[in-house]
């Protein structure tokens, strides 16, 4: 699959085109809750969206060309979610390091479970065909995790344990994300299913592991 295959025929400029694109993305997300991307056809997407297959082909070269904008849609939701994690009185409620890590793990689990169809699709596609990427995604992700992790650093600073290196921060994020990926993206085929690690136990043990890592 070439990079060209993942480009839009044209970006929507008119409201009607944007509405059509939203219908297609909503239809694709709905279908991804039922089956894998490889099992979905343009005709399936068209039928679910209430459009003709020709309408899709006038805008997209193939179904793979929907992936970048589907990922962009997910990225927007990610930013909204990240901005809400510590809103309200959550910082007051979760005032110590363990409580804040536990809340962060719970929120990641919730968001990942809500976003499983998109995440699973992008994960598999990246492994098979190469990256589905967005402009400035690295900067965006860094900003997102700076906001989400700041409350943890505050707790560490209060305990005079703020000697965190960039590598340690990156590894913390890697442990958090890859562990949740392994547990939820393909939960029927992973070590977590074989070990029968239920969600509550998983969250507790991941919290303990991240806390221990930060305090070493």
Image: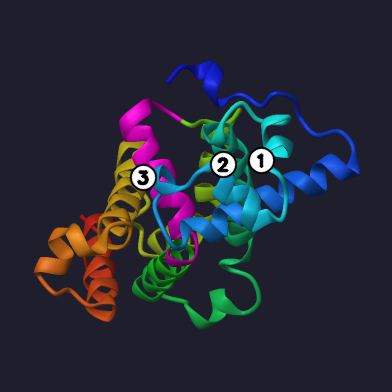
Q: Is residue 155 above or below residue 91?
A: above
Looking at the picture, how far across and down is residue 101, in whole percent? 38, 67
Q: Which is more toward the observer, 32 or 138?
A: 32
Q: Residues within 10 Å of mark 1 (few under 14, many from 20)?
A: some
Q: Is residue 188 left or right of residue 128?
A: left
Q: Residue 130: x percent and y percent?
A: 38, 26
What residue does disc 3 label? 169
Q: Mark 1 touching mark 2, by CB under 8 A?
A: yes
Q: Is residue 114 above or below residue 131?
A: below
Residue 132 appears in the figure: yes
**Label placed on residue 42:** 2
Give the magenta part as a residue range: 113-131
Is residue 138 a member of the stretch shown in magenta? no
- Where disc 2 sits, the SS reads helix
Residue 125 colored in magenta in the image? yes
Front residue of this view, candidates 77 and 106: 77
Sequence-wise, which precedes: disc 1 or disc 2? 2
Query: In this figure, which residue is indicated by the disc labeled 1?
Result: 53
Q: Mark 3 packing: few (<14 Cα in 10 Å), some, or many (20+)?
A: some
Of mark 3 and mark 2, the one earlier in the sequence is 2
């Amino acid at each position: 699959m070439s990079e060209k295959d993942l480009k839009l025929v044209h970006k929507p400029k008119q409201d009607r085109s944007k509405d059509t694109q939203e219908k297609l993305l909503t239809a694709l997300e709905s279908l991804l809750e039922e089956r894998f991307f490889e099992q979905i056809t343009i005709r399936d997407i068209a039928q679910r969206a209430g459009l003709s297959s020709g309408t899709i082909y006038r805008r997209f070269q193939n179904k793979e060309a929907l992936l970048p904008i589907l990922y962009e849609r997910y990225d927007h939701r990610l930013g909204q979610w990240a901005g809400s994690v510590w809103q309200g009185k959550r910082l007051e409620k979760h005032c110590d390091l363990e409580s804040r890590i536990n809340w962060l793990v719970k929120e990641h689990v919730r968001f990942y479970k809500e976003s499983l169809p998109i995440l699973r699709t992008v994960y598999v596609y990246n492994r098979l065909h190469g990256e589905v990427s967005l402009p400035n995604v690295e900067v965006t992700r860094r900003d997102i995790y700076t906001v989400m992790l700041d409350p943890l650093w505050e707790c560490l600073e209060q305990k005079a344990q703020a000697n965190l290196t960039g590598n340690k921060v990156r590894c913390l994020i890697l442990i958090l994300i890859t562990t949740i990926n392994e547990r939820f993206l393909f939960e029927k085929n992973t070590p977590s299913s074989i070990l029968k690690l239920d969600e509550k136990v998983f969250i507790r043990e991941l919290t303990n592991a991240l806390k221990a890592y930060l305090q070493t």
